[in-house]
Each structure stands twice: as structure tokens, then as C-alpha cells.
């Protein structure tokens, strides 16, 4: 999975809401559907997209399927965001240094 796939999967507010719920631990479709203002079939479709993007794992317990956030699936996205943040901080630092040098030369 690439970070682009994760970003596209998380672009939908319902999918972000599902991931938000799953931050607290694994849950079956029925529990997710109760917590969301969308139908159970819609929840299932969103879970499929998130799973296909590698963001979720699925475990069968009896007749229920429990969905959970996949730490491995978030790795590419996290790495991308870390690099983005590092680049932004470096640019900010460089700009601050440049600005302070200009001020010192006046």
C-alpha cells in the first residue's frame, strides 16, 4: 500500500469516523453501524475500502468479524506525514535563520 491509497481511503468522512471509532479497539460491523448515521450495508462498503487500502485487519470470532486498525497499514501514511512535517519545520527554520541574518545585517 502507498500513502496515496490511504489518503484516498481516508478522504471520506464516514471512513474517518470508522477509523476514529476503531482507535479505541476492534469492533464488529453491527457496533460500528450503531455508532454511525449510515446503514449497515454502507458501513460494510466503507470497511471494505479501508481494508483494501490496508488500513484495517479483520478477525473472525465465532459468527462475528471484528475490524481493527492495522499499524502496518498506517506505516506508509505515517512515514509520508513525518517527512512532510520534517520538511515544513526545516523550511520554517531556514526562513527564521534567513530573517534573523537580514535583521543582524541592518
Image: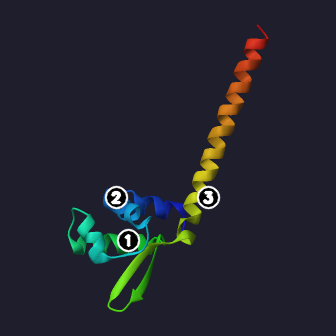
Note whether 72 is above or below 81 in the view shown.
below
Crowding near pointer 3: few (<14 within 10 Å), some, many (20+)?
few
Q: Earlier in the sequence, mark 2 or mark 3?
A: 2
Q: Label 1: state its secondary structure.
A: helix
Instruction: Residue 79: name its quadrant.
Output: bottom right
Instruction: Residue 88: name its quadrant.
Output: top right
Instruction: Residue 18: name its quadrant.
Output: bottom left
* Residue indicated by mark 3: 79
Q: Earlier in the sequence, mark 1 or mark 2?
A: 2
Q: Percent from the top left, x then y, of residue 39?
A: 20, 70
Note whether 11 is above or below 96 in the view shown.
below
* Residue indicated by mark 1: 49
Which label number is shown at residue 83? none
Q: Are marks 3 and 1 in contact (CB under 8 Å)?
A: no
* Residue indicated by mark 2: 12
State the CA–CA distance, disc 2 to disc 3: 21 Å
Q: Are marks 1 and 2 in contact (CB under 8 Å)?
A: yes
Farthest residue toward the front? 24
Amino acid at each position: 500500500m502507498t500513502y496515496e491509497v490511504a489518503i484516498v481511503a481516508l478522504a471520506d468522512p464516514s471512513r474517518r469516523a470508522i477509523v476514529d471509532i476503531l482507535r479505541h479497539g476492534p469492533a464488529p460491523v453491527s457496533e460500528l453501524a450503531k455508532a454511525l448515521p449510515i446503514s449497515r450495508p454502507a458501513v460494510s462498503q466503507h470497511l471494505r475500502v479501508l481494508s483494501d487500502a490496508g488500513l484495517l485487519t479483520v478477525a473472525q470470532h465465532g459468527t462475528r468479524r471484528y475490524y481493527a486498525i492495522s499499524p502496518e497499514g498506517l506505516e506508509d501514511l505515517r512515514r509520508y506525514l513525518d517527512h512532510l512535517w520534517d520538511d515544513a519545520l526545516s523550511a520554517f527554520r531556514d526562513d527564521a535563520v534567513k530573517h534573523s541574518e537580514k535583521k543582524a545585517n541592518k
